[in-house]
Image (cartoon, rainbow, N blue to C red):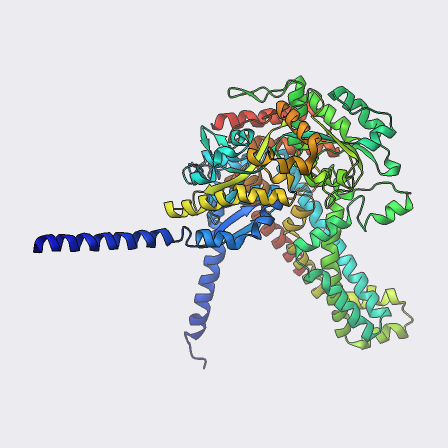
Amino acid sequence: MKPIRLAAGLGAAFMLSATVSTIALAQAPVCSAPVKVLAQPRDGLTLLEDSKAEFEKLAGAGFQIDYLNENDRRAKSRADASTVGNYNVYYVDEANVALFASSKWIVPLTDYYPADYDYADFDPGRQKVATFDGKVWFAPLTGGGDLMVYRKDVLEAAGIQPPKTLDELIADVPKLTNADKGMYGIALRGARGSGANVWRWMPFFKAYGGQWFDGDKPVFNSDAAVKATETYLKLFKDSAPGTQTGSWDESTGAFLSGQVAILVESTPLSGMAVDPKTSQVVGKIGFLPPPSPLPGGGYGHGLAIAAKANADDASKKCAGLFIAWATSKENEKRRLDAHQFGELNRTSILSSKEFADIYGADLGQALAETGKVTAVNFWQDPRWPDLGDRWGIILEELVTGTRTDVKGGLNELEAYANELAKKK
Amino acid sequence: MARRTSLPVTFVVPTIAILLVLSMVPTLYAIVIALQNRELSTPDYSWVWLSNFVDLFLDRRFLNAVWVSVKWEIVTVVATMVVAIGHGVLMFEVASPRLRNVYCLLFIIPVLLPRVSAAFVWKFAYHPLYGIATYPYRLLTGGLIFDPLSKPGTALFAVASVDVWQWGLFFAVIVLKLLETLPPQPIEAARLDHAKRWQIHAYVTLPMLKAPLISLMFVKMIESLRSFDLIYVMTRGGPGVATETLDMYAFSQGFIESGKVSYASAMAVLMMIATVITFTMLWKRVQA
């Protein structure tokens, strides 16, 4: 009897200790320290900060987001990731995800993204942008393509139909400019950067049949690039003041304050344009896909797990949980309730009745139409930011008149691209 | 008879050693990196010796950056000294002691502002549509647009004006205080000889202040070398490369565009050598 009692006693003690350990483990916080995030300003992230207590309860620690504007965020995250590694989570985008992934500055996301948070619910286009080399690297915070947003009242007054082709756009823009009354035909991006002026220039390049590389051989120095640049410079004559050295903020700011007739920009603009808090042109605007054959610039920004700051598995799990929570359906619903159009990425939200009730059928249809012409216009390679930024400077020089030889600029870029090609 | 003691050595040696470590280690490290081909995106590197320096002299943006830096240095130092001496003398001549104190307080405020804040304030002030600094132009021309930060001919001067606004007014306060410390007799003697006000300052007071004014100019020359924050916020080196100074270009190459830290270090090393040579020559010339 005694051995049986002893065995039973030991068994009970083992079960008890296992249960206690399980409970202890279940209650053990996933995060042991606040998650440090380097991001660029987004309404969705600002809203997220209101729910900080919720994450603290879930993970056992809070989070701290440092914000820098897009170009600064790119520079700082690159410097941080390659040196000290202070941040647990980086805000990455379509332009630098290849560089960050191939440099091993971030780790594959889905290894640490809890299954309950349903990554497959994200818009398939954004999932595609977040994927490099067959692995998913970030969870989207924003993304999409381009839309043409135009002022119905201004076009009607000028007797002009919304342009459906690029040729019509080129012809209409000068007619819509009336500088004396503070109205400009279009707003473009002049500021240097692969995600700034080059981003807006690329649809013209692609529309005229341009290609970046054939294998490792640069083929962009072509008639298509010259024509795209000349068209861009021609349109810039009617671009709103401040955009020559400005980017997204300046061009959308000019449109939302009522100074621009037509704007072809990334899709978040449409949500801002119908929001009375951010727009002075509510009720006066229409939406269409970009004039044919301009392709939309497919893009996606999101959160990725840093490699250096998350040296062990526990830290990576913590960062993964933060990203999953930040991009969860619950938080996305909060963004929808706050009318943050540009921050919506999940198909369950975009196809919901609440979305249609808020934004109407026109915008939904335009988004569906523009999805068909959305494409990846940039060179999907880790060396893209380097090449894109170099072209951004030359393009800024051309826009501001510091240089005038388009072909000379392209020759210079080709020489640089040949150097880059050797580095692979 | 003076006794030899080890006390000075005890105090001086650790301090000098710390200073040497703090200044020499980063400098030597920069020189070493400049002789390699390190890039942020890869841990691999090799020794390329002087190749980065040779490439720099074939790089049109580097040559442009040298020229822009020279222009920046001349414009900001000259304008700061003119504004400082002009305002200092003006306050000395026309303002009562109480009013001088008010002016001094007001003139010190700009330099107390962080450079980045000052740059943002003025960037918005120069906005072609909403800026307060461009408002008079719009008013006088019936609404014509003037965008100084996007014009290659005006961008450098627009950014330099912020630097002068901060330092010129601050130096004006110093010039005023220097004028107030001068003995009154030479000024009274000049007045008895019926010298005009401008003659008193041109031939009496300012020559008496030659040494401190030269020191102020050297301080400003060194300060002007650190133009990065203003230019980064206001133009990022643009339009094109019109305001791209050496430090801005080095940062671009190191961290914004290519991650070429060795190439950026080569620029930093050249800047250091050029600065040391230039300042040594100027200092010797001034002292001669």
Q: Residue, x 58% and y 52% (percent of image)? A: B276
Left or right, A280 with respect to A137, comes to right
- State the residue in front, A356 or A100: A356
The answer to whether residue B266 is seen in the rendering is: no
| Whether residue B191 is situated above or below residue A242 in the rendered picture | below
Q: Position of residue B109 (x, y in %)?
A: 72, 63
Q: Could you tell me residue B249's position as x and y percent?
A: 61, 41
Rendering coords of residue B253 (x, y %):
57, 39
A88 sits to left or right of B172 = left
Toward which corner of the image does residue B104 lie, by quadrant?
bottom right
Q: Nearer the viewer, residue A265 or B173?
A: A265
* Residue in the foreground of this view, choosing between A61 and A115: A115
Would you identify the image quadrant in which residue B99 lies?
Answer: bottom right
Inspect this view and state whether residue A138 appears: yes
From this viewpoint, which residue is outermost toward the front? Answer: A1
Report the residue at 50% width, 56% height from top: B23
Rendered-image quadrant of the C terminus of chain B: bottom right
Which residue is at a point 21% across and 55% down the rendered structure image?
A: A13
Q: Residue at x 68, y 20 (%)?
A: A293
The location of residue B234, given as percent across then percent down, is 69, 47
Q: Would you say B11 lies left or right of A191 here?
A: left
Number of marks in picture: 0
- Whether residue A271 sits left or right of residue B131 in the image: it is left
Q: Check the picture and name the quadrant holding the N terminus of chain B.
A: bottom left
Of residue A336 and residue B143, the one placed in the foreground of this image is: A336
Question: Where is A254 relative to B73, above or below?
Answer: above
